[in-house]
Amino acid sequence: MIRFFNVARAVAWRSIHNTLVNPAILVPSIIFPLFFLIAFAGGLSRISDVPNFHYRSGYTAFQFVFVFLQSAAFGGVFTGFAIARDFDSGFARRLLVGAPRRSGIIAGYTIGALLRWALTGGVVTIAALIAGMNIDGNGVDLIGLVGLGVVMNLVAALWACGVAMFLRTEQAGALIQMPVFVLLFLAPVYVPISLLTGWIHDVANVNPVTAVLEAGRGLLAGSPVKVAIAFASLAIGTAVMAVFARRGLASAERAG
Amino acid sequence: MTPRWSLRPMDAAGDDVAVDVALPQPGTLGMPPGPRFLEQTLAVARRAMLRTARQRALLIFPMVFPLILFAINGSALSPATRIPRFPTHNYRDFLIAMPFIQGAMFVSITAGVDLARDIESGFLNRLALTPLRGEALLIGQLGGALVVGTVQAVVYLLVGIASGVTFASGVGGALVLLLLSVLIAFAFATLGGLLALRFGTGEAVQGVFPLLFVTLFLSSSSLPRDLIKASWFRDIATYNPVSYLLEGLRSLVITGWDGEALALGFGFTLALLAIALFFAQGAMKTRLARK
Amino acid sequence: MSVAAAAIEVEKLVREFRKGPRAVDGIDLAVSPGEIYGFLGPNGAGKSTTVLMLTTLLPPTSGRATVGGYDIVRQGAQVRASIGAALQEAALDAILTGREHLMLQATLQGLPAAQRRQRAQLLLERVGLTEAADRRVGGYSGGMKRRLDLALALVHSPRILFLDEPTTGLDPQSRAALWEEVERLAHDEGMTVFLTTQYLEEADVLADRIGIIDHGRIVAEGTPARLKAEIGSPSVEITPADAEAGDRLAELLAAFGEAHRNGRGRVTVQLPGGEAQLAEIVRILDRADLKVETLQLHQPSLDDVFLAKTGRKLEGAADDAAVEPAANGRRRRRRGG
């Protein structure tokens, strides 16, 4: 167990360090979520004038939840890029050879992803507050919201780990990113699900991200809904992706 | 005509030996002074198109991604048509302009990365050693991008029509939309070429890509400018030339023949093209480093 | 040099880059028509920068040079019409086939349409790429790429050929084939060849004259034989079959010069009269009935020349200056030899 944590700590440290000393990685990870917040909350605020659009805390808060959770998901996705780069450069092989407990490698990357997201999530939250976002939830609600983000980040990081370890090349980037992107945008991003019509309504209804998004919005507005479903979905996602990532690691070990 | 050579080798000690060689003048080896501009441009364009045709897989993502966004946002944002004074009942009529601009931006990056690759690999140096003129290289290189832009535009148009988009300006309007969108793609491709010539690496060109997408979203891409609530955002969209490209395309679908919107759309496109071409030519001269 | 017209003439050529020392620091050289001139030096010495200037891809900071009788600064177009160049980067398009490369080059060089295909076919045959001609270059080996590179440089029948480290990274067979072609071009077709290399053997075997460059300056110039002769005469190292016979061996060899004793009875002596004295040594040893285990003749090498001129060996000199700016302004670490 100690060796597991030692490996995880070392990998996590490297992940954080590489992000902080490399502006080319750090800056986009902060800028993109901010940009989405500006574009959606700023540019689409008129959407709240659509008849029957009801959200107690206002459109900025409505969009903030999406951007917050999206940044969590993409924070996990970027971890996959880093792993893929490590394979391309040969560093991953060094890790596999040197680590006494290899499952600690996955843990390290996911911890690194979480710590990086802590920075991004913090910046996005501050920006939303400066923009005048209303918060109607209490402390427990907000912890719940952060908890959703943490688990979302974990699921995405494990997914990204798995893909990167199976494919072991930087060209896996699109395959890592696209499914997450599409899944996020097939949820009620711009309006509540009750206002969606057509095929998008049907898809959003079965999309697990919808429950997470609605739970987050409910927590921020102080009227929690679907919180249990949201966490259950994320827990299942975590379990599935953990197995996927472990299988990816095994594939990488077999490849040598 | 064969050159006249009369050559004796140096002696073993390396002492100079009088050499009598008649060095032929340029143009005496049976070749004309140099190929014409059109021939050069076509040769380079042919290469660009061969490269495009042989890397079809690279075309898929830039073509499909805007269509995915069109499909998703076309449905997800359809409640926006219920906002008072929204200009159409079918949100896809409003949104169809977006894929053309997104596609043009992808073309821009592809064209830029291709040219940057030639610079990095030294292939540009090889071309620089021929009588090839810089303008011919630039325009020929962009020829491949033009073909891709045209194919993309046709695909987006067909998908739009299939998804229920109707043209208030009729068939003629659809053709004008194609023309404008191809021009836009060419203008962005020239911009991509300029970035490649200026920075010289594919990485730098790709690094500009997010900025291009930012300009797309800070425009009237999702809502009409007069319906944007946040005044600061509305101002940015008003000063953003991309808004006028979108509105020019969109006017053919929603309004019909809107002279002002078309004039602004074509005007900004041609201005972008002219500015990008001007600076790209200068950058090409510097890059070729020839006097 | 009493030539009617030097093919390449360089006078006090300098190239400075904004950040860093002078890559080329005032070189003078002249290359006769039909000569193979070897430009030898370690990585970062200034060889490629010189080639880039002479091929008009990089403007000089100061100095002047003419190639084919044309000034590289004021008459760039005429220079380019007279030269072919195979630069250090093979600079090929992996997506195009070999034949397509040649057709493109022929078109851009202005060959009449009717001649292009024929010229391409001829060159493919000359460099041995007919079978691979219609395959994409991305699948070519390093040797094949170099051969195609050479063919492309010859499309317009230039009088002067620049080859920048043409055999770096090639296997011995490909290297030998390229040497053969270069010799044929120069000696049979009278082409002037300006060849840069970091390989001693390549310069020694191919070049009619060599210029040794280090830190941007030419430190020695001449034929390989003359350069080596300047350093000193050859030496012979003899190991007697009986290690005790070392003293007697030294006495016998003292007639030629100062004999140096090494371990195991080995004796080394210089041969001021050159390797022709070797026969005499053998006769003396035979008359004295002294059995020999090994007898080795050491010729001064170009590495010895470099050592004498710069104080370090050519083969280790790469570590000292391994970064040379590239024509596109980016600094690059050069490939090792």
Image (cartoon, rainbow, N blue to C red):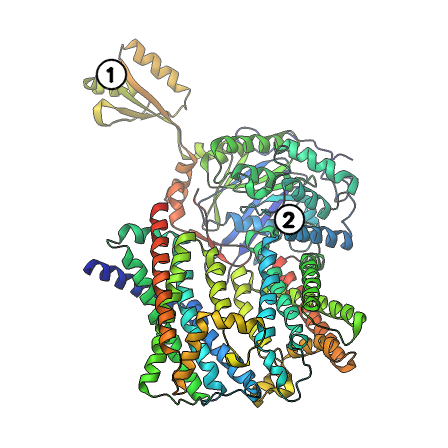
The x and y percentages for residue B219 are: 61, 79
Q: What number is the disc on residue B14? A: none
First reached walking from the N terminus: tag 2 or tag 1 = 2
SS under mark 2:
strand
The x and y percentages for residue C96 are: 63, 45
Q: Nearer the viewer, residue A48 or B233?
A: A48
Q: Nearer the viewer, residue C226 or C79?
A: C79
Q: Is residue B216 above or below residue A97?
A: below
Q: Is residue A63 above or below residue C86?
A: below
SS under mark 1:
loop
- Residue at image x 43%, y 73%? A71
Mark 2: give few (<14), some (14-19) or many (20+) Cα within 10 Å: many
- Residue at image x 50%, y 81%? A192
Quadrant of the frame with the N terminus of chain A: bottom left
The x and y percentages for residue B287 are: 61, 60
Residue of label 2: C66
The x and y percentages for residue A144 are: 34, 80
Q: Locate residue A161: give its quadrant.
A: bottom left
Mark 1: give few (<14), some (14-19) or many (20+) Cα within 10 Å: some
Residue of label 1: C241
Image side of residue B21 versus residue B33, left or right:
left
Q: Residue flagged by tag 2: what amino acid is it?
A: Thr
Mark nearest the camera among 2 and 1 is 1
Q: Is residue C224 above or below residue C318?
A: above
Is residue C170 visible in this depiction of the protein?
yes
